[in-house]
Amino acid sequence: MPEKKVTATARSAGRGSYAVGDARRRLILDTAVDHFGKWGFHASSLARIAHDCGITQGGLLHHFRSKEDLLLSVLAQSEEHDVERLFGTEPESYAAFLDALVRLIEDNTRRPGIVRMFNVLVGESGNVGHPAHAYFKERYARVLAHSVERLEDAVRRGELRPGIDCRGIAQEYLAVMDGLQIQWALDPDSMDMPARVRDYLQRQYAAIRAAGE
């Protein structure tokens, strides 16, 4: 049988349909961020999310199999952004790593919906039956392990004092950063969040750096 030739028009139509599908998927994800941030996972509904996207619930389910699938896709997209900003390049020092943390916080001030959603879902996911419980447990473990590794590397290089509690220090600054983001999400005008985080990290760094650094 003769091969069927794919015309330029057909190829263009195919690319167009993919572009529309990608745009609709992004719209659903962005709308879900807003809904999960306002109402949490359990009180959000696929029907309302679909309505705000201007599509049917069936149309939404064409892209995401369930509300749980949508939730995990939203979290994966957010984490991909954070990993690229924070872990994309190897910092030359622990001080440079802290600078990257502050830049991530600065970026978060331009993504208030993501910050609100994160705060709400972390609180909800303390329940072991929550669909994001395993995700957040594993996420905190990954972030903590990466932070401890940065601290231990800095001790070996002589940038930080030997004998410091690397795990405790990392747990402490992660708690401070999350706590400040909660306060900022409640009242963004109440503080300069990046400056507050920077001040705290500078004080912590001064307390643990090696003599002469």
Image (cartoon, helix red, strand yellow):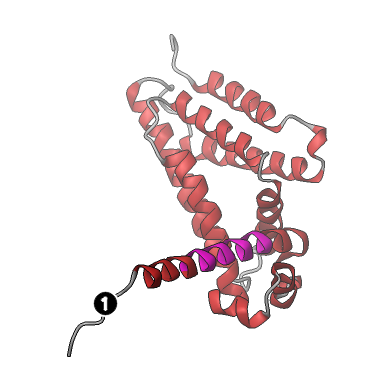
Q: Is residue 55 above or below residue 81?
A: below
Q: Which residues are magenta?
A: 18-32
Residue 23 counted in the magenta span:
yes
Residue 45 location, quadrant: bottom right
Q: Is residue 64 left or right of residue 152?
A: right
Residue 185 at x, y percent in the picture? 76, 45
Residue found at the very far bottom of the displayed protein: 1
User: Which residue does the numbered mark 1 point to in the structure image?
Assistant: 5
Q: Which quarter of the figure is the N terminus placed in?
A: bottom left
Whether residue 134 is visible to the viewer of this picture, yes or no, is no
Q: Is residue 185 above or below residue 66?
A: above
Between 101 and 166, the residue placed more toward the observer is 101
Residue 11 at x, y percent in the picture? 37, 69
User: For the point 52% across and 68% down, which residue is it?
Assistant: 21
Residue 115 at x, y percent in the picture? 67, 48
Q: Which quarter of the figure is the C terminus placed in?
A: top left
Q: Is residue 51 above or below residue 29?
A: below
Residue 75 counted in the magenta span:
no
User: For the point 18% across and 86% down, which residue is it?
Assistant: 2
Residue 9 location, quadrant: bottom left
The crowd level at tag 1 (other Cα within 10 Å; few <14, some 14-19, many 20+) is few
Between 165 and 40, the residue placed more toward the observer is 40
Q: Is residue 161 left or right of residue 32?
A: left
Tally of numbered discs: 1
Residue 123 at x, y percent in the picture? 70, 58
Q: Amino acid at mark 1?
A: Lys
Residue 88 location, quadrant: top left
